Image (cartoon, rainbow, N blue to C red):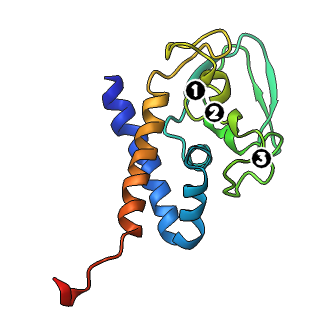
Amino acid sequence: WIAMFAGYGGTSNLAYETLKMVLKDPALYVPLFRKDPQAFMLESARLHPPVAGMNPVAYRKPTEMKLATGRNFQAREGSIAMLLSSGANHDPAIFTDPKKFQPGRKNAERLLSWNNEWGAFSSCTSVAGCEAAPRGCPGTFLSMKLATGAMEFFLTDMERPQARASEL
C-alpha cells in the first residue's frame, strides 16, 4: 500500500506539476534543478504537496483563529473541521514571498507536504515518526526519491541532442 500510494498518488502529481513548470521556462528551471536537485524538489513539494495533509479536528472549546486570508474564524465547542496542513506552505510568516519558486530558501525544511515538517521528520530514525514528528508519512522519502528520479529522467532526455528528421 505504501509503495502504491507514495509511488503513484501524490507523487505523480508532484512530478507532473514540477515538469509542467520546468517546460514553461527550461532555461530558468533546468539549471536550478542541476545546481541542487533536493532543494529544487523540496521547493516544488512546498508548492505542489504530494500529500495534502487532511487532518480531522474536533474543537473542545470555542477557538478563534486568524486565517491566512487575514479573516478571523470562530470555531464553536464541538465543531468538527478538516484542516489542510499543507496550506502552511504558503504562510508568509515562515516563507518570505511564498508564491515565488525559490530553491534553497530560508526555512525550506519547514514545509508541511508529508504531514510533518521535512526537517523534523528527517531527524526520525523510522518512517513511523518520532517525538519531533509524531505523525509520520511512511512514503515521504520514497516519494521524494521517485519525484526527483522522474525529473532527472525527463530532464536528461530533454537535454540530449535530438536527431534531425533527415537522420532518421
Q: Position of residue 49 (x, y in %)?
A: 54, 41
Residue 124 in the image: x percent, y percent?
59, 15
Q: Which residue is mark 3?
A: 69
Q: Nearer the viewer, mark 1 or mark 3?
A: 1
Q: Is residue 9 left or right of residue 22?
A: left
> Could you tell me the amino acid type at mark 1?
Asn
Q: Which mark is residue 115?
A: 1
Q: Measured along the vertical axis of the image, is residue 168 above or below residue 112?
A: below
Residue 6 percent coordinates (x, y)? 39, 32
Q: Earlier in the sequence, mark 1 or mark 3?
A: 3
Q: State the image coordinates of residue 59 (x, y, percent, origin top left).
A: 69, 15
Within-10-Å neighbours for mark 2: few <14, some 14–19, many 20+:
many
Q: Secondary structure at mark 3?
A: loop
- Residue 94 horizontal side relative to residue 50, left or right: right
In the foreground, 20 or 54: 20
Per the image, label 2 sits on a secondary structure element best described as loop
- Amino acid type shown at disc 2: Leu
Q: Is residue 24 above or below residue 46?
A: below
